[in-house]
Image: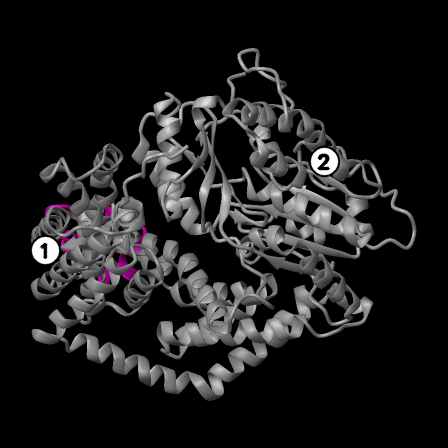
Amino acid sequence: MTELLSTELVVLDASLGAESADVIRHLAGLVADAGRATEVEGLFADAYAREQKTATGVPGGIAIPHCRSTAVTVPSLAMARLAQPVDFGAKDGPADLVFFIAAPEGADQEHLKLLAKLARSLIKKDFTAALRAAGSEQEVVALVNDALGLGTPSTTPATSGAAAMAAPAAGAAEGAAGAASGVRVAGGGPLSGGGGEGDHTPAGIKRIVAVTACPTGIAHTYMAADSLVAAGQERGIDVQVETQGSAGAAPLPKSVIDAADAVVFAVDVDVRDKERFAGKPYVQAPVKRGIDEPGAMLDEALAVAADPNGRRVRAGAGGASSSAPDAERHESFGGKLKRALLTGVSYMIPFVAAGGLLIALGFLLGGYDITGYADKIVAENNIGNLPTEFGPQAWGPLGAYLGAVLFKIGALSMGFLVPALAGYIAYAIADRPGIAPGFTAGAVAGFMGAGFLGGIVGGLLAGYVAHWLARRPAPRWLRGLMPVAIIPLVASIVSSGLMFVVLGAPIAALTAGLNSWLSGMTGAAAIVLGVILGLMMCFDLGGPVNKVAYSFAVAGLGTASLDNQAPWMVMAAVMAAGMVPPLAMALATVLDHKNFTAAEHENGKAAWLLGAAFISEGAIPFAAADPLRVIPASMLGGAVTGALSMAFGVTSKAPHGGAFVFFAIDSFLLWIVAIAAGVVVTALAVVGLKRYVVRKAPEAAEPQPVAV
């Protein structure tokens, strides 16, 4: 197996800069210079993007920046012992020991297990003390290899001094957690061996099971597991952890879960098979809290277990609800509301996408007067009996029939827009018991003409009523009926009843007013709306502001018709503006080769296709590396495109697909002109800013000379 660490990847007592970006860039350079990565910039961009998601500083003056990257060819470690500690986001202060973990996208399991083992070793005080005392790069390599169980390489001088003292200490520390009575870690990591066939914990000891998981699955997953285990040892608590990381996940035995008093979820991603823990008291927080405050999480879990009304894992928990942070404790009301609305929109979009494209195909084959005869043609269901006057003469009766069928399927699909929106908003709030009352409330909103606004209100009502009912204590004999009968019944009556009796009519009036306003927009008003939508679409490239603009456009499609084409115009403007940033970044890399890195040139090639398909996220690599120049330039171009699209009166019956759904876009050539204008404006703005505006962001700082 290839060595993970060598002397050329170690820097001792160096000053590498004042920011975490400086240190990461320097260590990425060491990996590339050693021939273990194809380029510095691509590796740095991936590592720094990971750092911005979750800071990698951990208690004890340690930082472990890490990433998976296509630039990496060999799984590698690079280590710096800093003369001037640098802040990596740890609560106890800056880090002086920095280990950079660089893994290829397709790293094999053995290498990933070693990387996880290193991450675990770094929370052992004896090991880190030995690293700080090491007198040479060779000693550091020997310490790390011993901690990983690889032994001292033949090319490395014999271990001496600190290395000789700490090698057994590191190994002993590694085994201590696993050997301790009743304290085990599952999940395929180096401390695996716990979670046997049953529970053998002495009577009277509190038992906690935990799941740890982070997006990369290399470092934080395993460090959080060991931190929880160590905190459990200090408190005399039996802690068994399932690590759902890159090194594999060995599920905790059912007997262990059944015997647990509480569950700790230290996760940034979905918990796999969360329903296994149904009914258990739990706490949930980001994985980094499992490293920084493991004792507090264990104490909170036991406190919840002692509270009869404490949080319990819901039966059937999974999907969006399982990946969300602890909604009861760590998410604000506004955060819950935003998550619920975005969940509803995300589940609604497939209905709208299929329906909109089918309606567009129906118009293409059957002509725009198909709305008047689609039902009659479908009812006839006999092509031979169809008169030739149905549909455009170019397609004849067969085209008219197929167009009518496609139009009718599309119209029926669009009919699910409001119920699906409401149903999945309720699902995001109350899980599965909220789906039926949410769909019902959405159907009532559609019946009353309340549109997507009514769907939002109905979904929220149904979700919160179902959520409240699910939290009510119920006799054991009734619990089985609650999620499948009682909650859907009562929540449907309350939410749909309120929509019928109180809320439906006012919301319908508001919806009619909004539709009338959109329909009456012409000239300057339409252009101003296009500018606003364009700015929103390009502000955060798939983030919350972008999604608000996109959701507004998609929700309006359900009210569009030949007599009210304003929602189609809004959809065309939103989709066009969202295509600008990736296409503009691709063009900018062609216009100005020098000011873009090799990685950005590769991203630029991919951005042509991503932009053409209306995937705004294709510009994120550029924005992440240079936000102060890329984002304002993108917004400028997006505003131009949105304004021109609205001024030209272009309409789109499809909510997604970009240039590939040309048949669903009227005045397609004018739409392309609007996009091209915005792309050129943004590309020229980016090139000008890169040439004439000096960037002072930390990631642009040059590595400082190494002082040893």
Q: Please provide percent x and percent y for residue 366.
A: 19, 53
The amino acid marked with disc number 2 is: Ala
Please tell me whether residue 387 belongs to the stretch shown in magenta: yes
- Quadrant for the C terminus, please: top left
Q: Nearer the viewer, residue 376 or 407?
A: 407
Is residue 230 visible in the rendered image? The answer is yes
Q: Position of residue 15 (x, y in %)?
A: 39, 40
Asked whether 342 falls inside the magenta stretch, the response is no
Q: Which residue is mark 2?
A: 173
Residue found at x 27% / y 45%: 700
In x, y percent, where is residue 598? 23, 32
From the viewer's perspective, tell me whether residue 553 is left or right of residue 269.
left
Q: Nearer the viewer, mark 1 or mark 2?
A: 2
Residue 674's mark?
A: 1
Quadrant (top left, top right, bottom left, bottom right) of the N terminus = top right
Q: CA distance from mark 1 to mark 2?
A: 64 Å
Type of amino acid at the residue the image marks with label 1: Ala
From what the image shows, is residue 254 above or below residue 466? above
First in sequence: mark 1 vs mark 2: 2
Q: Residues within 10 Å of mark 2 (few under 14, many from 20)?
A: some
Q: Secondary structure at mark 1?
A: helix
Question: At 44% across and 76% down in the image, what residue appears?
Answer: 457
Part of the protein shown in magenta: 370-395
Q: In terms of depth relative to the viewer, which is nearer, 647 or 49?
A: 49
Give SS at disc 2.
helix
